[in-house]
Image (cartoon, grey):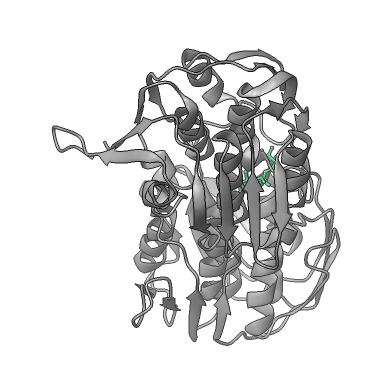
Amino acid sequence: MDKFVVRGGNPLLGTIKVSGAKNSALPCMAAAILTEDEVILENIPQVRDIETERKLLVSMGAEVELGYGRAQHRTRIKCGILSDPVAKYEIVKTMRASSLVLGPLIARTGIARVAMPGGCAIGGRPIDLHILGLEAMGATITQDHGYLEARSPNDGKGRLKGAHIVFDKITVTGTEDLLMAAALAEGESVFENCAREPEVTDLAALLIAMGAKIEGAGTGTIRIQGVAKLHGARHRINPDRIEAGTFLIAGAITGGDLSVDSCEPKHLGALITKIEQCGVKIDVGVDKVRVRSGGDLKAADMTTEEYPGFPTDMQAQYMALATQAEGTSTVTENIFENRFMHVQELIRMGANITISGRTATVRGKSPLQSAAVMCSDLRASASLVLAALVADGETILDRVYHLDRGYEHFEEKLRGVGAQIRRMGDVFGKK
Ligand code: UD1
C-alpha cells in the first residue's frame, strides 16, 4: 500500500490547476447506459473511482475507452449491447456510487441486478430513497443473496412510468439515479426536494444534450418529460469544486499565496465566505480563485449543509484549518453520521478537538507535530495531508489509496507549488 511522506513548513506559492469533478463524471458515465450511441465525456479526472466505473460498465458489456484519442481526459463510452446488466458485488463494495447504474440500467434494459452496498466508513449510507423512487415509477424490486433485482413494469418488458416523487431527505446520487430513470420513462415526472448540487446540474446538461427533456435541475423541483429514446452526445465535465476547495485550504493553512485555476468560483461560495471569516484574503476571477494568508487565522464555526451550504466533503479539510486558527471553532456535521474519522488522527498530531454528537469543538491554535497516521476515507486523507503541510517534521500517511479514489496527481500538483510531499510504495510491493 502506498504511503505519502510529507515534510511540513513550506508556504504554498504559485498556480495549481483543478481537474474535472469525479462526482459529476461518475453519474455522467452511468448516463451513457441510457443510449446505444457513443457518449464522449471531456475533462474526466484520472482517479481510481473512474477506473472502477469503467470496469463496472465493461463488465456489463459496454465499450469504454479512457484517455480516448490523444486527450488523456477524454472518455468514449458505447453501451451498444448490455449483455450482462449486473453491478457485481466485487465492484460495488469498492465504490458505493456504483448504485448510480440502477436507474439507467432498468430504464434501458428493463432489468437490473445491483449488489447492495455494504457498510461504509462514514455511516450507513442507505439507498432506500433510490428504491422507493423507482418503485413509484412502476419498478418491482426484490432482494436476493445480497443483490437488488429491479424490473420495469410488465416483467421487465414495459417502460417505467413518470411519477411525482417528494424526496424524504435530500440525496445527491438519489436525485441523479431517478433523473436518469425518468429521462426514458413514459410520461411526466416531477421530483421535489431534489439535491441542488452542481453535479446534478452537470448530469442534467448531459442528459439534455442526449435528447432528454428536463427543466429545473439545480433547483429543488425538477420536471422531466420522458422520451422513448436518447442519442449520443459530447459533454465537458465541470471542474471539481471539492478539489478546488482543498487547494484553497492548502494555501490558507500554509500561509501561502496560491492561485487555484480552472475552477468554477460560483460553486465555491459557502467555502469562500467561511475562509474569509477566518481572516484569509480571497480574490475571485472568472475561472480562478486566489488565496492569500499571512498564517494568522481566526476561528469560525462551520456547519455542513446541502448545496449551496458548506459541503460535507470539505468538512475534514476545514477541520485541519481550524486547528491552526486562534480561538475555538465548532464544526457540525449534518449530512453524515460518523464522519469524524480524521479527528483521532489530527489529535495524534497535536490538535485539540473534542466531539459531542455531531459537533466537534476545535481549540486553536495548536502546533502540529509529525506522526505516522492512517487515512480512513477520501476526504479524511486530504485533511491529514493539509495538517501534515504545517506539522513540524515528517509525517507518514498510510493507506493513501483512499485519496487516490478522488484526487488526480495530488502529490504532484502540491509539489508544483512548493509542498514537500512524495509517494512511497510498499517495501514489500503489496498494493
Ligand atoms: C454524494 C457524493 C458524496 C457527498 C454526498 C453529500 C457522489 C458520488 N458522492 O454522496 O461525495 O459526500 O453526496 O454531499 O456524488 N440517504 C438516505 N437514503 C438514501 C440516500 C441517502 O437516507 O436512499 C441519506 C444518507 O445516508 C446521507 C444523506 O441522505 O445521510 C445524504 O446522502 P447522499 O446525498 O445520498 O450522498 P451520496 O449521494 O451517497
**Of residues 289 and 150, which is closer to you in this image?**
289
Report the image quarter containing ligand 1.
Answer: top right
Residue 388 shows up from this direction: yes
In the image, residue 220 sits, relative to residue 81, either above or below, namely above
Residue 184 shows up from this direction: no
**Of residues 41 and 6, which is closer to you in this image?**
6
**Residue appearing at x 62%, y 83% in the figure:** 210
In the image, residue 269 sits, relative to residue 33, either above or below, namely above
Residue 316 in which image quadrant: top right
Residue 83 in which image quadrant: bottom left
State the image coordinates of residue 144 (x, y, percent, origin top left): 49, 45
Residue 331 in which image quadrant: top right
State the image coordinates of residue 213 (x, y, percent, origin top left): 76, 81
State the image coordinates of residue 253 (x, y, percent, origin top left): 58, 34
**Residue appearing at x 81%, y 66% in the figure:** 163
**Residue appearing at x 26%, y 36% in the figure:** 1
In the image, residue 271 sits, relative to residue 294, either above or below, namely below
**Of residues 30 and 59, which is closer to you in this image?**
30
Q: Residue 88 vs residue 319: left or right?
A: left
Q: Residue 430 vs residue 361: left or right?
A: left
Q: Residue 12 vs residue 131: left or right?
A: left
Q: Residue 202 vs residue 156: left or right?
A: right
Q: Pick the quarter of the image with the C terminus.
A: top left
